[in-house]
Amino acid sequence: MAHLADDVAAIAAEASAYALGLWRTDFKRWEKAPGNPVCEVDLAVNNMLRERLSALLPDAGWLSEETADDAVRLNHRRVWVVDPIDGTRDYIRDRDGWAVSIALVDGEQPVIGVLDAPVRKEVWRAEAGKGATLNGRPITHSGRKTFTGSRTPTDTLPTVDVDLVAVAKPNSIALRIAMVAAGEADLLATIRWGHEWDVAAAVLIAREAGCEVTDALGRKLRFNTPRAEAFGVLAVAPAIQLAALARLHDRAVEALGKPR
């Protein structure tokens, strides 16, 4: 598995170098839906990753933000779950908060995860049962024990959360989860439906760094599901997990009950 993880990291590095070479150039960009940007680099990186990763594991299925979903992936025990550029909005706006995200899922759980953020010069890696690293150095969560004062990557804090501390937020949710894994933040929470490709690699990195990671209601996250979605994500230092879930609960229940 270690050799396979090295190969995945090398492919991620190739893809991120390609994307970096086109960053801040005059590439085509548009919206798939209002507020959901995409660019031609997303598609080119997606094609590169699919070719390289499929050659690496021909028996693995495929799930990616930039590929039309095919239910045949559900017949595969192992599936690549990929976001070619997580944080496209930052990529388009010449900001550094984007990364190539690759996860290998085996039996509904990620077993290899790589995030390659070339502008930030950050490479995050994890293998199931072997810990997580940032640029080759082992990482772990902050160890925070008090919920009040916890750092969370966000632009603004709602009034109900003014006892928390906002820290710089990359557009990539994968990088925000990775910040918790490295102790650069204490918690990351979302309370909306999200796609598996956004978080699969980062979830493994956070788990292997000792974080507690669940959906917004505290349930275990699973991958390669029929809808390829989960209701929110909470990545948190273990000692403050219960307080974080209690803080989120009413908002999560309300959001879950709203029409999608």
Image (spheres, grey):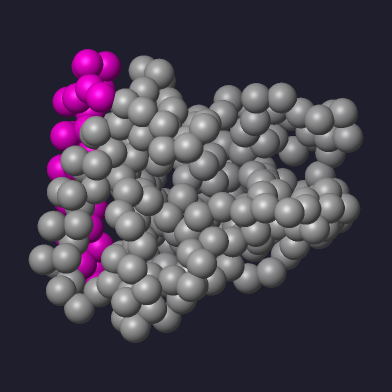
Estimate the x, y position of residue 208 in percent, counting from the top left. Answer: 49, 62
Q: Residue at x 19, y 25 (%)?
A: 22
In the rendered image, is residue 240 in sight? no
Is residue 209 shown left or right of residue 250?
A: left
Position of residue 140 relative to residue 213, above or below, is: above
Position of residue 165 relative to residue 206, above or below, is: above
Is residue 39 shown left or right of residue 88?
A: left
Q: Which residues are magenta?
A: 1-28
| Residue sitting nearer the eye, 5 or 95 | 95
Estimate the x, y position of residue 201 in percent, counting from the top left. Answer: 41, 56
Q: Residue at x 48, y 59 (%)?
A: 196
The answer to if 13 sits in the magenta stretch is: yes
| Residue sitting nearer the eye, 242 or 182 | 242
Q: Residue at x 53, y 71 (%)?
A: 222
Estimate the x, y position of residue 60 in percent, counting from the top left. Answer: 25, 74
Is residue 73 shown left or right of residue 17?
A: right
Q: Residue at x 52, y 31 (%)?
A: 35
In the rendered image, is residue 24 in sight? yes
